[in-house]
Image (spheres, grey):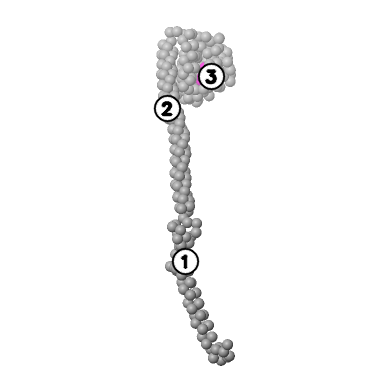
Amino acid sequence: MIRFIVLLLLSVGCGSVAVGQKYPERREIRSGNKLYEKGSYPEAEVAYRRALEKKADSYEANFNLANTLYKQKRYDEAEKLNGQLAADSTHLQEAASAYFNQGNALFEQRKLQEALEAYKNSLRLNPNDQEAKFNYAYTKKLLDQNKDQNKDQNKDQNKDQNKDQNKDQNKDQNKDQNKDQNKEQNKDQNKDQNKDQNKDQNKDQNKDQNKDQNQPQDPQQNPEGGEQPQQGGMSREEAERMLEAVQSNENNTKKKVDEQKAVVVGRSGKNW
């Protein structure tokens, strides 16, 4: 609820003319009040501003103008104007209502802590104001609820954050651990593989070397010291025997030829 101020000015007889001359803004304020009651807030604002053009320090015109701003949901402007009215030491009686209206404008902007202070200031000036007490209590309850909610939210957020952080940390740790483990495993596996490969290679090499060492130096000589058969199947001994036989035949043939020559010569020449 917004507090509204209507200043009552008494007039006796022709005193209304004097009042109009002393308070030239009064006609515009009355016009604004009628428009405000009808819910024509933009038109009421115009009337109050016309009143302020005639008297800039009119507390009533400023107070009611702040209300029209609030009704038009221009809460920031209403808050500032009510703050100025509440700080006016010449109108302490109306200051409690100005603080109350300021609290409402702050509440609509969800500035709960500032609204709570405004209601508190209103109660300091008017401790028996039931509306101010209710608004103060309600605002404080919302602040406490928001505080607990933020606390739980931060707790859950920190819990989830720590959970995700630990999850990522464990993931990276396991990744590095598996990487090192695979590295060592591959290293050992390659080491064993190279060891076995070198072992087999050395084994084959030693086997071939021993085989070459055990073979005869002369490829034509057998292990028993005999002669190795030739490619045609004839041994060296056989070849030598065959050569001796051929030589013997040649000698016999030569002997027979010489004998025949001797006979022929004796018949054709002198007999010695």
- Disc 3 marks which amino acid? Lys
Q: Residue at x 48, y 69 (%)?
A: 240
- Disc 2 marks which amino acid? Lys
Disc 1 residue crowd, few under 14, some 14–19, many 20+, Cα 10 Å: some
Q: Which residue is mark 3?
A: 80
Query: What element does badge 1 sit on?
Result: helix
The answer to whether residue 7 is above or below residue 152 is above
Residue 80 placement (x, y as % from top left):
53, 19
The answer to whether residue 116 is above or below residue 227 is above
Report, in whole angstroms, how far the alpha carbon at label 2 lies from the one at label 1: 95 Å
Q: Which residue is mark 1?
A: 236
Residue 140 placement (x, y as % from top left):
43, 15
Which of the two labelled residues, at mark 2 and mark 1, occupies the earlier sequence position? 2
Magenta-highlighted residues: 78-82
Q: Residue at x 42, y 12 (%)?
A: 133
Residue 163 got which mark? 2
Residue 99 placement (x, y as % from top left):
49, 14
Q: Which numbered disc, 2 or 3, marks the residue closer to the eye?
A: 2
Which of the two labelled residues, at mark 3 and mark 1, occupies the earlier sequence position? 3
Query: What element does badge 3 sit on?
Result: helix
Front residue of 178 and 208: 208
Report, in whole angstroms, how far the alpha carbon at label 3 lies from the one at label 1: 135 Å
Q: Is residue 149 magenta?
A: no
> Which residue occupies the extreme bottom position in the image?
268
